[in-house]
Image (cartoon, coloured by chain):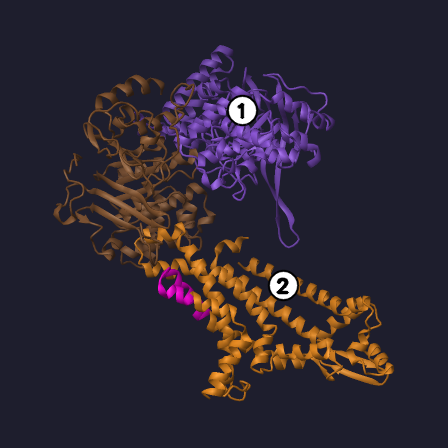
Chain colours: A orange, B purple, C brown
Amino acid sequence: MLAYLLRRLFAAAVMLVVIVMVVFSIFFLIPKWAGVDIATSFVGKQADPAAVRAVAEKLGLDDPIYAQVWEFFKGIFVGRTYAAGGDVTNCAAPCFGYSFRSEQAIWPVLTDRFPVTLGLALGAAVLWLLFGVAAGVLSALKRGTLWDRGAMIVALAGVSLPIYFTGMLSLAVFAFGLKWINAEYVPLADSFSGWLGGMILPWITLAFLYAAMYARITRATMMEILGEDYIRTARAKGLTEQVVIRKHAMRSTMTPILTMLGMDLGALIGGAILTETTFSLPGLGQAVLNAIRNQDLPVILGVTLITSLAVLIANLVVDVLYAVIDPRVRLA
Amino acid sequence: MSENAEDKAVAAPAQSAGATLTKDAAPGETLLKVTGLQKHFPIKKGLLQRQVGAVHAVDGLDFEVRAGETLGVVGESGCGKSTMGRLITRLLEPTGGTIEFEGKDITHLGVAGMRPMRRDVQMVFQDPYSSLNPRHTIGTIISAPFRLQGVEPEGGVKKEVQRLLSVVGLNPEHYNRYPHEFSGGQRQRIGIARALALKPKLVVADEPVSALDVSIQAQVVNLLDDLQQELGLTYVIIAHDLSVVRHVSDRIAVMYLGKIVELADRNSLYKAPMHPYTKALMSAVPIPDPARRGVKSERILLKGDVPSPISPPSGCRFHTRCWKATEICKTTEPPLLELRPGQRVACHHPENFEDQAPQDTILLSDAKEAAELVPDAVLEESAETSAAVAAETGAASDATTAEKAPAGKKQAEEK
Amino acid sequence: MTESTKSGAAVGEPAAASPAPSAFLEVRDLKVHFPTDDGLVKSVDGLSFTLEKGKTLGIVGESGSGKSVTSLGIMGLHTAGQYGKRKAQISGEIWLNGTELLSADPDHVRKLRGREMSMIFQDPLSALHPYYTIGQQIVEAYRIHHDVDKKTARRRAVEMLDRVGIPQPDKRVDNYPHEFSGGMRQRAMIAMSLVNNPELLIADEPTTALDVTVQAQILDLIRDLQKEFGSAVIIITHDLGVVAELADDLLVMYGGRCVERGPAEKVFYEPRHPYTWGLLGSMPRLDRDQQERLIPVKGSPPSLINIPSGCAFNPRCPYADVPKDNVTRTVRPELTEVGSKHWAACHMSQEQRERIWTEEIAPKL
């Protein structure tokens, strides 16, 4: 088990380095080949040539690519100082780059926005796991009944309706129409109840989409598992149906669901752009949306790296959980 | 028969591709010759996929298949018999050794080089459900070899397919049906028709009847029999069922952990098996005769399981489970020798024959344990026959053989 | 209904009217039907037999003959895995030790499962849960029916593993199924099914997935354990060799019905149904001299949705055209006694069958 864990960790670390290098190349090499001046895109098209030159020098854009990658890596761990002539900008220890558009280091932006997105993703995940899996299991057990059909129609609706539709609808009804909740984002540190109020609609909206997908997958998996020989063995032992489902069938059903959860959570942490925009949540998604609009490359680069990191960590957690659930994985 | 016409049609490419010097092998002549055949599947581990070992699936086979005969290959799961089938049809690339078909080395021929050969060597698979594409009609399935080889049979593809269908006992009118409309036995017939389409010389059948019901098995076995008679086919039939193999084969190879332990003509093998494993294998087959129920006097129970082919035992691979194993079995691999005409065996202490290593008399501790599972009657009989053979061939080894066998028996009695 | 079984129970009478039988297990007119889109699948269609403690009944048949469904029906598992609509329909009577199972409270039947009657399945790898250790699975089977702590149950599991011949049982008990070989898994499965000393053991193709040398070990084990525990055993298989090894009585199934039933010696040496002849003729035999040709049964097994009217074997029977007295072809032949405790369901007269067997079939086998 420990060996398995170490192997996974090592693989994750290698993966991270590869990702940084690939992302870096995409952002710096390809524009170069395409003949786009990166410095211009860093400061903006309106800037005068001298300013562009200064930025290029400051960022070391004229250095060879490996030197740039190295500088970037170093910056993550020891911080970085951008200097050109007398113009010195400091970027403290976990330096994920510096935005010359907004004149600020990327890292504080990320740390500022990350908790919002994380809270949104995790809260929604709890909801969709609870309701999606429960609905899926019930549908599998009541196959062909009115409940099953009803649940699957709702699930189909959930999968097909876009977030901005369900989100706007829920805002219109619950926040503006009924005025049950005040749909404004309040940081958790300021007020728990305020935070809860602001998050509840985004959670439900996001969870609705995912719960629908999870219900469908759970139903299909559960039906397959219930046909397995070892479920028949469990019944042949004289176990009650409840124990058969809970102890024997559920554990197997969780495996594919965990895999999905790892990928979905990872992707969501990188920014639930639609949900964040619909509910005006100041999360990573919004940050990246703004950055794209302003062609603020360093921010996009930083968020991309954070997203990859999130997917990586989520998958690592899933791998570990997988090994806990399925003993066969531990040996592989 | 349209055979001649078709031969003409296909003769040109076949010859140009290299099967130049050979004519069709006459019955009894060697059609396929395998020397030192090996297949090791590497086991890769870790991030860098380093090779940490290998599954020795097939580890040095020597045998030949004669034109017109049926060679049966038996063995338990993991003995490498299916891998062997895939090697001689060149669906797998051998790790070592050579395969000669009609005198031509085909061991490392590429896809293009094998193409003319594919016409002559065909395979029938075990599972009639998964080896037919469910989206194609059986007409398409059976005519696929014509398309792939660019052959235009006389009278057209459709007519030829219908002829093949009737040859394997199916209704030619079912040309346009899909595999799911057929039962398991009928699907296996379709598989056989496909294999016969190009009039192959050698048909390799891997467990052709084991997925079928008993009554259907017999239909397919008889069909294979009839086709051999009519078309002069040569078969290699791989199966785990010893009664089926005995029924269909002229000669039989017994495999254990990637090796042939015994290769003999059918009657010798079943009447007087020489390798202890062959003997154990045959005694394990349940006999459909209630009068023999509970009679344990003949059954040899092997202890434990087949060892892993990743690290096969040293010397004779069977020594960990054999009740006759001595030191030499652990240290020296016995060669496959023709001890009796038509009967090759790889054993230091064969049954029904003179001991090959009479000086080595002390049983391994494993062998003593194994002997406890062997009925006294079998040990006595084995001692008697060995003694008789020894007496015939000279008095020299007489004392030791007679001494050795009761040693195993004593162990059995202690229990 | 002319069936003259030992119990004398007239097939088809309502359950309440029939008295509890003296036999340990008695199945009367069992029917298991599965509704599907294509129609009603009559997997078992009127099956009756009895079994005493300490005896072994072999049920022989090909795929789709209803032999596995019969065993699931006895265990009350025929609806297992079926949820919502379209459950299997079962009728008839199953008497186990004086209790009628089909009319009994389902929870009562559940409590009998695993304790009074237990089952071994064909493929031990898929029949054991991959995520639990062998020990956990045996302990669970023991603790449902015995109010003991985990330690005691674990000791019992180790004891059972030892009994079925697993080396180092105190270590192996903590292994997962995938760490066992095929033969070891089947031994563990047997240990699990015997942990509560059941009086009825049903083995559904227990050796089909195993190699022949391992099969010999397992058959040996089942025979020894039966002697030791004195339970009644039903062994379901397509392999006549396996039943000949174990069974006292034999029941040959075809198309969901019993075509022949009797002591194993009778069925093997004096079979009285053309299908049984077909099975015997289809099988190459190691204990005889080489047969020139096998004698297969023509055609394929019947569809269980459209079982031929009359005798289900009629379309494949080589003797379908033999002239028969006073027989309507479309009437289903009943089991009639053809010898002591030996029944067969065929429209041919007993003399006709005796003649065909001794003159035409037996010499060719």
Hey, what amino acid is under mark 2? Ala
Give above or below for A65 relative to C305.
below
Residue C73 in the figure: left or right of residue B146? left
Q: Is residue B115 left or right of residue C130?
A: right
Chain bearing mark 1 = B
Residue A12's tag is 2
> Of circles 1 and 2, which is in front?
1
- Residue B3: x and y in percent read 61, 22
Q: How far apart are marks 1 and 2 (CA)?
A: 53 Å
Q: Is residue A259 found inside the magenta-colored segment of the image? A: no
**Image quadrant where one finds the C terminus of chain C:** top left
Does residue A145 belong to the magenta stretch?
yes
Residue C319 lies left or right of residue B144; in this view the side is left
Residue type at mark 1 is Leu
In the rendered image, which residue does mark 1 sit on?
A: B71
Magenta-drawn segment: A129-151
Residue A87: name its quadrant: bottom right
Residue at point 64% right, 19% down? B24
Q: Is the magenta stretch mostly helix, strand or loop?
A: helix
